[in-house]
Image: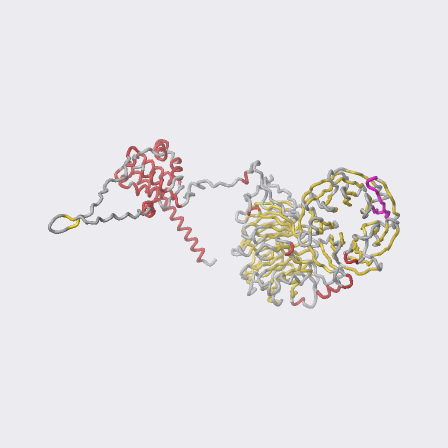
């Protein structure tokens, strides 16, 4: 069964992809007056100017050919050609080829495409219609290069694998001239700055500068590095220089005036130079290759050689281990099969860093160069990093494939560190079959723990590189070390051996604290330091979760059908995400012990890491140069975290492209599936539970104090104007003169009118009357819950006979309270309503036998409920006190 709707993670974008085997294209934007570079990266087109990159739209498959004119960028995959406008929108699609397109040439209002079956089609750009189709015979003329010579109206020059060249008029569909060639396959054609002159690159390494008007060879050069892959002419500063690329990554610069080699730029790329172009009018050369590098070279030094002005580069071989660096979630450290350690920024690629390639001796490596470097270290298999003290000394420790020495790296200096850590007994000689297998670094950044294939576990100081001790007498485990971990307080070191044991050691004294045997041999461990949870991957494709406090396996997960490659915890320690060789990525919920998300990818994920901020999951895949980011959808949308059913069938998810992908919400017309409907909690979870209402405290807490609140809130009377005194004060006649006392106002009449029986019956009163016969009190209770405190007091006052009520209705109210206590819900409301009722009608209650009898029943119910609650409270308080005070 497949889950409807989206999962927990959504494809976002890919990091570290900058170039491929497709040559780049340089185009000039007339309105912006700026040169733009278009490079094909997988299924996308990147457009660069001097300082920024704009990812374009994504095609369904990897781009195999690229071209551009002043308005559009043309990209093809398989037998379909697309045209991009504004660097991102696909505005035209051309379908008609039956084989893969391998050559493209914009041609005014037309574009020419050639497929591997030797079919040339001229397309009208706007109408997307075929203007002309020419079929060539593969045996006599297999088209291998295509060029439109400058000033040659409606004409194209074709090169072939047989070595001959043909000049065609596209408008009249005529072959104008056939050049005999040089008997060698043509690999590339390039227009020279001079009119009628074309540079022809041959498979033998020869470069022929030929005048096609007179069919004359002007000059000829030869390179010893194999076929010519790219040619470009420099037009800046009047320097007549031609650059030529090779399959081994070298670039040769030829002086066309003196007709000789000017200089060589060796190891410009580690793979073939796919594309090369001089920026017109500037001493800049742009190159790209299949080594995932895009470089701009500037020629401003003596000797004519170039230096790298700026570059964008990722791994030239697939990454094998990735980990987030630091706590801000903005940098990902990546170790690749090319032997380099690189840092990729999730914010902007200008913050990317390359820490270089590991080397035994840096000075000797620089002298020998990239190809002949025998001092280079093998690829990194595992590493650990810590930001504490990284500005003071090295903060990264790494072990290499089949190599006994572990290296340190400095993130801030972006280079290999000062120390090479290996056991003292192997300081003079290097053993063949002993190597480091696992590393970890303490949270303080002071110590590194290294596990060996022999079972030894050593501790080194990161600042000095000095060996600080070893766990166990000679070795910690009988088998090879499969994983090491240090807790967050430097109290425990946990080691896993291939013999199936997990051991706990005191970090400082190196004493063995505890050892436990596992059900199977572990293949790796991962510790979440904040929660003290240890994830263990086993060789039988299962996963165990161990609590380092109790030292027991608390969870076991099974479901993978291949070797588990990597694991990562969510920042809160709630999820464990695993990847396997069965191409699945699964998310396990640790509190519930269930699988909550699973999806498949095209190639297996070899490494996983979760952002410390929880926003992204990063993955690296088999035979893939990129690092793929998956956004955590639970942070910004409603995601079902229910356990997946046993018959769940995971869906295949396409890997993210280079441009950020928007997570499209489900349209309003579609009905949400049952899993995605928001869960509504019932009013009462269980009949035996005492349940409170969801009303705010202001609705019931102050019911007993309403009279005090009203007095406090009563507005003050406005100040009275003093009576004006008469000029002559009146006196009482008599022998003794006395003043007439002021007349006092006698306001004995009450303004409160006792309506009595004239009062209208309220809805609450009517519902209580009906409940006497039906014994259903839900309606009056719901009505009372919807009222405010003042209205509640008015309703309860109206139940008494002097307020227009009756004893029967008061009895009905008490029965409603009894029903609430019986069902054990709205517990605090029952207490508040009963307290106010007793306060208002105490005199009437004491004089009515029916009401007194009902009150005695309520009293017994209240006492029973409270005794039950008090027992639960006391039990919980005892457990909490024990947990706080006991030394577990």
The one nearer the camera, 643 or 407, is: 407
- Point out the residue furthest to the front here: 727
Q: What's the colour scheme? A: secondary structure
Q: Along the horizontal axis of the image, is 131 left or right of 10? A: right
Q: Measured from the top left, where is residue 618 in percent x and y?
A: 62, 51
Q: Quadrant of residue 261?
A: bottom right
Q: Position of residue 152 (x, y in %)?
A: 82, 46
The magenta span reads 157-172
Residue 682's place in the image compared with 566, above or below, is above
Along the viewing direction, whichever of 401 and 671 lies nearer the viewer: 671
Seen in the picture, residue 628 relative to 779 is either above or below; the reply is below
Residue 516 in the image: above or below residue 818: below
Residue 566 visible in the snapshot: yes
* Location of residue 128 in the rendering, given as x and y in whole percent from the top left corner: 74, 38
Check residue 262 for magenta coloring.
no
Q: How many marks?
A: 0
* Image quarter hosting the N terminus: top right
Looking at the image, which residue is at 70% across and 64% down? 360
* Residue found farthest to the left: 735
The reply to whether the magenta stretch includes residue 165 is yes
> Which residue is at the front of the view, 886 or 567?
567
Residue 104 appears in view? no
Where residue 652 sits: x, y (%)?
64, 43
């Amino acid at each position: 069964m497949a889950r409807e709707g989206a999962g927990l993670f959504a494809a976002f974008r890919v990091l570290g992809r900058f170039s491929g085997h497709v040559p780049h294209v340089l185009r000039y934007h007339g309105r912006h007056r700026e040169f733009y570079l278009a490079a094909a990266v997988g299924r996308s087109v990147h457009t660069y100017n001097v300082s920024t990159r704009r990812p374009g739209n994504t095609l369904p498959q990897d781009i195999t050919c690229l071209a551009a004119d002043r308005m559009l960028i043309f990209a093809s995959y398989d037998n379909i050609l697309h045209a991009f406008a504004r660097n991102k929108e696909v505005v035209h699609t051309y379908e008609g080829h039956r084989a893969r397109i391998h050559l493209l040439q914009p041609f005014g209002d037309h574009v020419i495409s050639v497929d591997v079956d030797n079919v040339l089609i001229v397309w009208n750009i706007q109408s997307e219609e075929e203007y002309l189709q020419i079929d060539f015979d593969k045996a006599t003329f297999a088209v291998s290069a295509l060029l439109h010579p400058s000033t040659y109206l409606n004409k194209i020059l074709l090169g072939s694998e047989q070595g001959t060249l043909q000049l065609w008029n596209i408008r009249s569909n005529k072959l104008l001239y056939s050049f005999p060639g040089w008997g060698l396959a043509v690999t590339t054609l390039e227009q020279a700055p001079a009119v009628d002159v074309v540079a022809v690159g041959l498979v033998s390494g020869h470069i022929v500068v030929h005048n096609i008007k007179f069919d004359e060879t002007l000059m000829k050069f030869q390179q010893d590095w194999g076929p010519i892959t790219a040619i470009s002419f420099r037009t800046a500063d009047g320097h007549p220089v031609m650059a030529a690329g090779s399959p081994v990554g070298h670039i040769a610069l030829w002086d066309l005036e003196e007709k000789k080699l000017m200089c060589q730029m060796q190891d410009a790329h580690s793979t073939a130079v796919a594309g090369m172009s001089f920026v017109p009018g500037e001493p800049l050369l742009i190159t790209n290759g299949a080594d995932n590098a895009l470089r701009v070279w500037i020629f401003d030094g003596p000797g004519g050689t170039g230096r790298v002005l700026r570059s964008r580069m990722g791994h030239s071989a697939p990454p094998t281990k990735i980990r987030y660096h630091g706590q801000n979630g903005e940098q990902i450290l990546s170790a690749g099969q090319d032997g380099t350690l690189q840092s990729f920024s999730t914010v902007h690629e200008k913050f990317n860093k390359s820490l270089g390639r590991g080397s035994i001796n840096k000075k000797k490596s620089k002298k020998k160069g990239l190809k002949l470097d025998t001092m280079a270290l093998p690829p990194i298999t595992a590493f650990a990093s810590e930001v504490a003290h990284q500005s003071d000394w090295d903060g990264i420790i790494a072990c290499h494939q089949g190599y006994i020495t572990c290296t340190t790296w400095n993130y801030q200096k972006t280079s290999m560190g000062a120390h090479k850590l290996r056991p003292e007994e192997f300081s003079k000689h290097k053993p063949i079959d002993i190597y480091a297998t696992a590393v970890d670094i303490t949270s303080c950044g002071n110590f590194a723990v290294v596990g060996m294939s022999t079972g030894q576990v050593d501790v080194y100081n990161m600042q000095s590189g000095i060996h600080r001790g070893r766990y166990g007498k000679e070795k910690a485990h009988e088998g090879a070390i499969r994983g090491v971990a240090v807790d967050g307080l430097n109290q425990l070191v946990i080691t896993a051996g291939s013999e199936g044991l997990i051991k706990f050691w005191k970090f400082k004294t190196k004493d063995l604290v505890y050892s436990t045997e596992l059900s199977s041999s572990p293949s790796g461990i991962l510790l979440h330091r904040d929660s003290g949870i240890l994830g263990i991957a086993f060789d039988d494709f299962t996963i165990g979760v161990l609590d380092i406090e109790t030292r027991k396996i608390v969870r076991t997960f099974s479901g993978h059908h291949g070797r588990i490659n990597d694991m990562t915890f969510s920042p809160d320690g709630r999820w464990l995400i695993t990847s396997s060789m069965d191409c699945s990525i699964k998310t396990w919920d640790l509190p519930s012990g269930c699988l909550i998300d699973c999806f498949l990818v095209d190639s297996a994920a070899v490494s996983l890491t979760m952002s410390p901020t929880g926003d992204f999951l990063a993955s690296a895949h088999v035979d893939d140069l990129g690092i793929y980011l998956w956004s955590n959808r639970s942070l910004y949308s409603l995601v079902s975290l229910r356990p997946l059913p046993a018959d769940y069938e995971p869906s295949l998810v396409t890997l993210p492209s280079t441009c950020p992908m928007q997570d499209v919400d489900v349209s309003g017309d579609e009905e949400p599936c049952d899993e995605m409907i928001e869960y509504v909690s019932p009013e009462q979870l269980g009949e035996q539970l005492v349940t409170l209402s969801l009303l705010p405290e202001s609705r019931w807490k102050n019911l007993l104090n309403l009279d005090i609140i009203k007095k406090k809130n009563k507005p003050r009377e406005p100040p009275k104007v003093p009576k004006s005194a008469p000029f002559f004060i009146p006196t009482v006649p008599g022998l003794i003169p006395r003043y007439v006392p002021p007349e006092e106002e006698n306001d004995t009449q009450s303004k409160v009118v006792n309506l009595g029986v004239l009062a209208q019956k309220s809805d609450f009163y009517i519902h209580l009357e009906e409940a006497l016969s039906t014994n259903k009190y839900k309606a009056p209770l719901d009505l009372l819950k919807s009222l405010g405190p003042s209205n509640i007091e008015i309703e309860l006052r109206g139940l008494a006979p002097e307020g227009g009520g009756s004893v029967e209705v008061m009895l009905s109210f008490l029965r409603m309270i009894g029903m609430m206590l019986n069902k054990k819900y709205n517990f605090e409301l029952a207490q508040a309503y009963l307290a106010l009722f007793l306060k208002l009608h105490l005199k009437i209650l004491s004089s009515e036998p029916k009401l007194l009898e009902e009150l005695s029943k309520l009293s017994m119910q209240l006492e029973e409920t409270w005794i039950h609650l008090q027992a639960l409270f006391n039990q919980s308080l005892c457990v909490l006190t024990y947990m706080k005070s006991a030394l577990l």
